[in-house]
Amino acid sequence: MEGPVHVYLVGAHATGKTTLARWIRDNFGLPMISEVARGVLAEMEERLDSLRTDVELVSHYQSQVFERQIEAEQSQPGSFVSDRAFCNLAYAAHHSNVMNEVTTDPRFAEYMGQVRKGIVFFLRPHRELLKEDGVRAGVDWEEVLRIDGMVKMMLEMFAVPYIPISCLSMQERTRTAERVLALAGLNPTQPRRRYLQSVAPVPARGRTLSETMAGASNAAPSAGGPGTL
């Protein structure tokens, strides 16, 4: 890819987006855009419970999150990794009255165009990852599935190319991210860590397995020789 590379991790809450984004940040040296929703919530000095019951309040909150995300990305002149993109609009569609206003705003079409040019990982949900953290919209499994479906619908609706990550294993997730980013021309900035202590090689004792097998092959009788029928 030419120019700055924008890496997005999208999906429902409690899917491990921030965890994987941090791994990409630490291993590829990319600035990370994170905690936008938390920052807006802290500034509003509101409790999460209020966002679940006050439609006007949640409409203001979701519109602010969307605008702050755009501002945060525009403040990064180069490559970056972000633990969200348009994900909050999936919540807005379920809990607020702001969806039509946001999607008809000229900035929305421009923003989706920018996301379309980036590398988008779509993290799918797992029950094992559900936990309350005071910011997420809830840890109800049905709610997570609804948001997951909405995010997928938006990816398809706006023709955003994406790499689905359905595995739960962090090892498999990082392997997938590492390979995709390598194909995009990004290489890790940190050398792979070694866990075994460096020691002097142990002198070989006797013949190696390959030598033993080669000797056995040479000793075998040839076709038509003694021992054949």
Image (cartoon, rainbow, N blue to C red):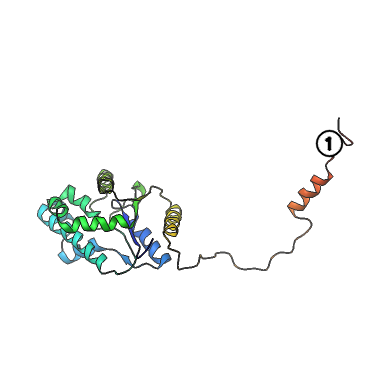
Relative to 102, residue 157 above or below: above
- Front in this rendered view, residue 150 or 137: 150
Relative to 172, residue 45 above or below: below
Q: Residue furthest left?
A: 56
Relative to 34, residue 146 above or below: above
Quarter of the rendering containing residue 196 = bottom right
Q: Quadrant of the N terminus?
A: bottom left
Q: Which residue is mark 1?
A: 223
How many marks are shown on the rendered structure?
A: 1
Identify the residue at horizontal 34%, vertical 68% (top origin).
31
Quarter of the rendering containing residue 114 = bottom left
Q: Is residue 85 visible?
A: no
Q: Position of residue 134 (x, y in %)?
A: 24, 58
Say left or right for 183 vs 138.
right
Say left or right for 16 vs 221.
left
* Disc 1 residue type (three-letter): Ala
Identify the residue at horizontal 22%, vertical 54% (top origin).
88
Q: Residue furthest front?
A: 2
Identify the residue at horizontal 19%, vertical 65% (top origin).
42
Q: Is residue 126 visible?
A: yes
For label 1, the crowd category at 10 Å Cα-Cα, with few meaning under 14, some 14 to 19 and many 20 or more, is: few
Q: Residue furthest right?
A: 226
Q: Position of residue 139 (x, y in %)?
A: 27, 50
- Front in this rendered view, residue 152 or 103: 103
Identify the residue at horizontal 43%, vertical 53% (top origin).
176
Say left or right for 211 vs 128.
right
Q: Position of residue 110 (x, y in %)?
A: 22, 58
Q: Quadrant of the C terminus?
A: top right
**Tag 1 secondary structure:** loop
Q: Position of residue 140 (x, y in %)?
A: 26, 46
